[in-house]
Amino acid sequence: MNQRRTLLIAGLASVAMLAGCAGPQVSDYVQQKPLLELDRYFNGRVLAHGIFQKRDGAVARRFTVVMDCHWEGNQGVLDEHFSYADGSTERRVWRLTKHADGRYTGRADDVVGEAQGQTSGNAFRWNYTLRLPVDGSVYEVQFDDWMFLMDDHVMLNRATMSKFGIRLGEVLLSFTKV
């Protein structure tokens, strides 16, 4: 019985790993325009409107974000102020570093370790683990975050949130540079 359980777990883990490899890569967008340069787009004030949808598609939270962003050389700060429809607020300050070949790393107080990202064409893929408070407990959840620059002012963002490889929901955002 123990051996069957071990084989089942190993098989499920293999399927999950293969499914993760089957998705799009940021390099798939290398020819897409306009070219996304994070340090240009996230410089100045940016407004965002978003929702969090649970796994079943139900909208659980609506929010707006006011971002004050600035860069000095290859170091950037994105100061995000969240306002939720229920009246609650939150603040996250990202400290980003721009590296060669469109790579970015970042840290924030509620992010575990270092976020890793890559731009290519009009796309940016960003992966990180976030400490998420829920009903008095804090959970570490993973984000697979995709951003697509539509024009000089608008960028769309879709982030999948998961825990142990199980999809919990999605965050959808529309950024507008002012």
Image (tube, rainbow, N blue to C red):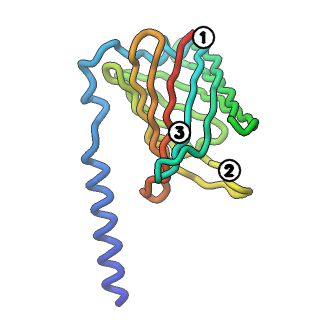
| Vertical side of 64 occupied by 60: above or below | below
What SS does tag 3 mark? Answer: strand
Placement of the C terminus among the 4 image quadrants: top right
Label 3: which residue?
114
What SS does tag 2 mark? Answer: strand
| Vertical side of 53 occupied by 29: above or below | above
Amino acid type, mark 2: Pro
Sooner in the amino-acid sequence: mark 1 or mark 3: 1
- Taking the spot 60% from the left edge, 27% from the top edge, the residue there is 95
Amino acid type, mark 3: Glu
Q: Nearer the viewer, mark 3 or mark 2?
A: 2
Residue closer to the observer: 137 or 135? 135
Give residue 44's mark: 1
The residue carrying pointer 3 sits among few (fewer than 14), some (14 to 19) or many (20 or more) residues within 10 Å by Cα, namely some
Sooner in the amino-acid sequence: mark 3 or mark 2: 3
Label 2: which residue?
133
Look at the numbered discs 3 and 2 and tell me whether their residues touch, using CB distance below 8 Å: no
Q: Position of residue 146 (x, y in %)?
A: 41, 33
- Marks 1 and 2 sit apart, C-alpha to C-alpha, by 29 Å
Q: Furthest-front residue in view?
A: 58
Q: Which of marks 1 and 3 is in front?
A: 1
- Taking the spot 39% from the left edge, 29% from the top edge, the residue there is 118
- Marks 1 and 3 sit apart, C-alpha to C-alpha, by 24 Å
Look at the numbered discs 1 and 3 and tell me whether their residues touch, using CB distance below 8 Å: no
Amino acid type, mark 1: Gly
Quarter residue 147 falls in: top left
Q: Position of residue 21 (x, y in %)?
A: 27, 48
Q: Position of residue 51 (x, y in %)?
A: 55, 36
Q: How many numbered discs, if any?
A: 3
| Vertical side of 45 occupied by 96: above or below | below
